[in-house]
Amino acid sequence: MLILMTLVLYHLPMATVAQFQQHYADLRDEELIHIALTCNLVPEAKQALAEELSRRGISDLSSHKALMVQEATAEEGLRQKRVARQLKISGWHTKIVYSIGILTLLYGVFRAFIPNVTAPADDVCIALGLVVILFTWLRAKISKIWVAHVFRRQQSRIDQLKHSMDSDGAATRPNR
């Protein structure tokens, strides 16, 4: 709730340095550090934040930034392990469904060459086998595209955290 109020306060066009100072005075150290490292602030907010950090004796944010990057990297590593496990399961699922589609297709072809007059299902088996193979292939392609997009997005978030401080030490907001 407090972070939400802080984010709303940043975008008020008429907010003064005094309003920002009052707001920052009510925040905990961790919240101030988080704001300094992750948010894009208007000049008045930057000035008030710098004054509040200085008043509290918080001058070097590099160790906090390094900790945030370390936590984000560890979190990304765990997420990648979960995604890799899910991909492995999905790969086995795809192989099993491909096998069922191929067996159904082969059974339909077999029945086409050796017809059974009591149960003519040759065309249905061929069509069903082809449909299963086609949809399984399509699902596998979509999954690969999705996973590539998710990995790229998460890695860019970590890169943005690593480079979140500009040259004068003011915090900038990562693009989301």
Image (spheres, helix red, strand yellow):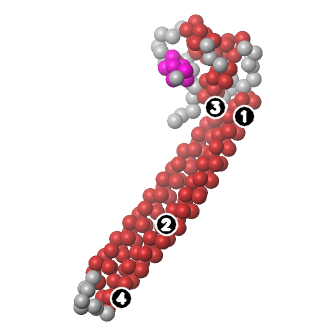
State the SS at label 1: helix
Q: Which residue is mark 1?
A: 66
Q: Is residue 163 left or right of residue 173?
A: right
Which is more N-terminal, label 2 or label 4? 2
- Say which amino acid is labelled 2: His
Farthest residue toward the bottom?
A: 114
Residue at 70% in and 31% down: 65
Chain part drawn in magenta: 2-9
In the rendered image, residue 3 lying in the magenta stretch gets the answer yes
- Residue 36 makes an appearance in the image: no
Query: Closer to the observer: label 1 or label 3?
Result: 1
Q: Which residue is mark 2?
A: 93
Dividing the picture into quadrants, the one containing residue 61 is top right
Q: Which residue is mark 3?
A: 164
Label 4 to label 2: alpha-carbon separation: 25 Å
Which is more N-terminal, label 2 or label 1? 1
Q: Is residue 24 above or below residue 154?
A: above
Label 2 to label 3: alpha-carbon separation: 41 Å
State the SS at label 2: helix
